[in-house]
Amino acid sequence: MRILIRNGRVIDPATNRDGKYDLLIEDNKIIEVSEKIDTDADKIINADNLWVMPGLIDMHVHLREPGFEHKETIETGSKSAARGGFTSICPMPNTNPPIDNEFMVEYIKVKAEREAIVNILPVGAITKGQLGEEMSNIGNMAAAGIVALSEDGKSVMNANLYKKAMIYSKNYNLPILAHCEEKSLAGKGVINAGSKALELGLSGISNDVEDIITIRDIILAESTGARLHLCHLSTEGAVRFLKEAKQRGVLVTAEVCPHHFALTVDDITGYDTNYKMNPPLRNRNDVDAILEALKSDIIDVIATDHAPHHEYEKNTTMDEAPFGIVGLETAVALTITELVDKGIITPMQMATKMSFNPAKILGINKGTLSEGSIADVVIIDPNFVGTVEPEKFASKSKNTPFKGRSIKGRVNYTFVSGIVVYDVANE
Amino acid sequence: MWNYKDFIGIKNLTKEDIKHILDLSFEMKQQMINDKAREIKQTRGNMTTLFFENSTRTKHSFYMAGQNIGLRVTDLAIGTSSVQKGESLMDTLQTIDSMGTDIIVMRHSESGSQEFAARNCKASIISAGDGTNEHPTQALLDAMTILDKKGSFEGLKVTIAGDILHSRVAKSNLYLLNKMGAKVTFTGPTTLVPKAITQMGAKVCYDLKESVKDADVVMGLRIQMERQNSGAFPDLREYNKTYGIDGAIFDYAKKDAILMHPAPVNWGVELDRSLFTAPYSVISEQVTNGVAVRMAVLYMIMEYRNNRK
Ligand SMILES: [Zn+2]
């Protein structure tokens, strides 16, 4: 099987290509990228005015399986990923039971093998049961194929245990994906602390909730030499600490989610629970700091924190509703609309932050369109103009605050190992 | 003219809406206190009280108000219901709604629960307080009391002391008094009076005497025991010494100032016991006005429903 993608704008950070190229896929590999490929193919795709990027990699998703299959499954989550242009996604371990030993990792891998249409790269919990009491089976999970460690949903509050896990993880060269939240300060907060919370009578989550653990984790990364990756960074302070740590050579990277650069706390309308996520939507100055850090590459990665919840779970009060929104199928459009179109980042930076850097941080051989590599490819139409339509999502859940929002850009094709897993023509 | 299905907050009301309710409230009160019970405006319909937080007084006030205007009043006793067994708010609301009540008077510990109920019920929702969001009938009865004593809101200085951060009463009062032309000053410990509330149009002052100076109205708020336990201040003794209102503090206010409190009072904490019989205290009138205001609101909502049938 040969697929020829003609005349697209190939944007590939690994080879530093950005220009008009033809790209030829044979079976599961990219076999040629050059200005003109004259050859027969089983399928020829005209990519005039389209972007051809290495398949996107989302380091931060929640697939809810096992335990919460009413929200999402490995199968539906992978379809949502394919529709969003993602060819590899990393499910967080906060399932029920959590992914904290090699048997659970095997379970995810077997399910993925059978049902997923994109690559599923599991993340293992740092502590058993994510209870923050004992180290999980990090070594066994590494052998079973996890790509990172995370306690996502919370922080390991016991600094001694956390530090030991960081040191232990070094032997397996696994990055620590850190959700930074000081639990006692966060209290029962549901949105950003400040005048909006006061007005609505809701408990607030202040910036220091995130800042304190961010700086703690940076200090521990520095003292242990472990690789730290900050998840869903949302505050001006965290950006400042990150920048300063990078300047000193600490092994730290960071991701930001589209909602944290596309929205502020002032966008929250009434008690709409689709605006409840953790970390919460912050103030303008926080968003401005994030935009600046995306531009200057202080922030390495754009990840979605795709957090599906069933409608009945979100249709309640702000206090009762679970945190989180879906993100896989809006990430490309929001990134183009809010960052690329506004001149904050280039298309090359987009490919770097959504594919090349995640691969590098996870230490996987992906995120590239170089000849001979596995054909994980996405074709994006950056000029498409439309609105966010949750009813079309492939995800089981539709919990998004972006419903009806005008956006630019969409995914036309997604290929995983040379196979078309999404084609916009089939919508 | 009232044009909303529900009554869940002051924030979105106009000055005219508020005047309309207050006029009707005074009318209701006249009939009520002059023992002309047979002349009280009557309506027909069902009303269910649904109190997820205990409040014997407020519930009883609504109960009386509903009966005074001819409603058939029932209570869903949360303490003995399946709500205790983890039934969701949505389930409870849908159950009552399906039974066909006209009005649900609800109190709930979560902010926004009234809006949620209004969105999901055919019945009219009347708020008896939600979380730290609003307690609209309390603000109305306070306004009625102030108007009765002062004749107008224009330019009045209203000082409210206590736990402003967690007070739905303070917020509903702020919305209402701002709309009507009075000026609100909040005072209390820095942990309980956030500076950010100035963005909602209040003055903030952490010195009690300074706050009370030249006030027309001084209102104490109930200090909840949980606040002390949450570490917002050391203990009730210290709170009373710093922010407790007594006769000496009251001397800083205007000569004809009135003392208000949403009740029940923690005597010896936010108010000194000596104020129990103070001539400038209007606390018991607030209670009477509470019934009148609730009669007005219930009547108004029933009129709206009947006109739409
Ligand atoms: Zn997280």
Image (tube, grey):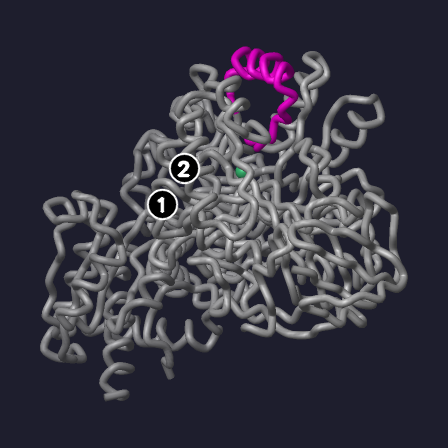
Can you tell me whether the CB of the residue at mark 2 lies under 8 Å from the nearest atom of ligand 1?
no
Q: Position of residue A399 (x, y in %)?
A: 47, 58
Q: Position of residue A46 (x, y in %)?
A: 75, 72
Q: Which residue is mark 2?
A: A95
Q: Which residues are magenta?
A: A156-181
Residue at position x 43%, y 32% in the image: A106
Image quarter of the C terminus of chain A: bottom right
Of the residues shown, which amino acid type is indicated by label 1? Phe
In the figure, residue B287 lies in which quadrant? bottom left
Residue A68, disc:
1
- Residue B227, compared with residue B130, is above or below; it is above
Residue placed most toward the observer, B306 or B244: B306
**Taking the image as four quarters, which one is ligand 1 found in?**
top right
Residue placed most toward the observer, B110 or A282: A282
Residue at position x 46%, y 61% in the image: A398
In the figure, residue B7 lies in which quadrant? bottom left
Inspect the magenta stretch and tell me whether residue B208 lies in it: no
